[in-house]
Image: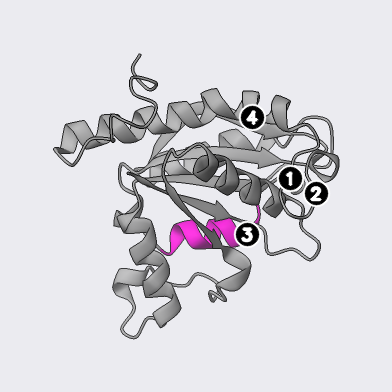
């Protein structure tokens, strides 16, 4: 079974986007799609970027641990809020400190905002940065408008049926990309008994 890492990007007090990260962890596990983990940037006290990990003479253990988890995961789901039309500095910091770890890594992006557009303004900027660093960004989108109303603090959606229906094609696209990469690199294929044929197109 593949591993999906959910990157919760906001370190802001009373953040709401983390609720979406909690939801996706539950969704992935409840549907037996993959094993999942949340990397919460609020728990990683990274210094402001001044050099890539590979060039640091004495990198912090926490940073090495973060890099290893990104390197080993099969796919990544980034959950980011929109702040003033952009994504948080904490996320840019985490992206820039690594390099090879992002190479050809399938990444799906979830955007969230308190307004009506769901943070879609941040999507192009973040996709461009990930493209420049060599990641494989999934062409599906998952904007969450009025995130403070859409999920409670434990990641439970206000309307689970509707949210799950919206999440299914989004996650399926990430799973398809994971499977395609595994086939191209010769690594183990996804278990056929889990939603067999669901990700074939």
Q: Considering the image in quadrants, where does the N terminus appear?
A: top left
Q: How far apart are marks 3 and 1 (CA)?
A: 27 Å
Quadrant in the rendering for residue 54: bottom left
Of the two numbered discs 3 and 1 on the same chain, state the one appearing first in sequence.
3
Q: Does the magenta stretch include residue 180?
A: no
Query: Dot 4 surroundings within 10 Å: few (below 14), some, or many (20 or more)?
Result: some
Q: Name the residue under label 1.
A: 156
Q: Is mark 2 on a helix, strand or loop?
A: loop
Query: What range is drawn magenta here?
Result: 87-97
Q: Considering the image in quadrants, where does the C terminus appear?
A: top left
Q: Name the residue under label 4.
A: 164
Of the two numbered discs 3 and 2 on the same chain, state the one appearing first in sequence.
3
Residue drawn 33% across and 65% down? 68
Question: Is residue 62 shown left or right of residue 148?
Answer: left
Q: Residue furthest top?
A: 201
Is residue 99 visible in the rendered image? The answer is: no
Q: Please determine whether, in this image, residue 118 is positioned above or below residue 196.
A: below
Q: Distance between the residues labelled 3 and 2?
A: 25 Å
Q: Are marks 2 and 1 in contact (CB under 8 Å)?
A: yes
Residue drawn 73% across and 45% down? 156
Q: Mark 3 points at which residue?
A: 89
Q: Distance between the residues labelled 3 and 4?
A: 30 Å
Of the two numbered discs 4 and 1 on the same chain, state the one appearing first in sequence.
1
Residue 141, label in figure: none
Q: How far apart are marks 4 and 2 (CA)?
A: 15 Å
Query: Dot 1 surroundings within 10 Å: few (below 14), some, or many (20 or more)?
Result: some
Q: Please determine whether, in this image, residue 90 is positioned above or below residue 50.
A: above
Q: Distance between the residues labelled 2 and 1?
A: 5 Å
Of the two numbered discs 4 and 2 on the same chain, state the one appearing first in sequence.
2
Q: Name the residue under label 2.
A: 152
Q: Please determine whether, in this image, residue 4 is positioned above or below residue 65.
A: above
Q: Are marks 3 and 1 in contact (CB under 8 Å)?
A: no
């Amino acid at each position: 079974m593949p591993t999906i890492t959910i990157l919760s990007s906001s370190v802001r007090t009373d953040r709401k986007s983390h609720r979406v990260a909690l939801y996706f962890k539950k969704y992935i596990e409840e549907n037996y799609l993959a094993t999942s983990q949340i990397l919460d940037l609020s728990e990683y006290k990274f210094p402001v970027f001044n050099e890539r990990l590979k060039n640091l003479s004495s990198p912090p253990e926490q940073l090495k641990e973060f890099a290893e988890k990104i390197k080993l995961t099969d796919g990544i789901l980034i959950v980011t809020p929109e702040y003033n039309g952009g994504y948080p500095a904490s996320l840019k910091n985490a992206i820039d400190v690594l390099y090879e770890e992002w190479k050809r890594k399938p990444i799906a992006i979830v955007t969230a905002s308190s307004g009506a557009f769901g943070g879609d303004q941040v999507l192009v900027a973040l996709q461009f940065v990930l493209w420049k660093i060599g990641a494989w960004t999934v062409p599906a989108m998952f904007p969450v408008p009025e995130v403070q109303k859409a999920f409670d603090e434990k990641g439970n959606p206000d309307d689970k049926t509707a949210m799950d229906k919206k999440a299914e094609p989004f996650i399926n696209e990430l799973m398809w990309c994971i499977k395609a990469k595994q086939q191209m690199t010769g690594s183990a294929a996804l278990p056929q008994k889990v939603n067999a044929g669901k990700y074939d197109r």
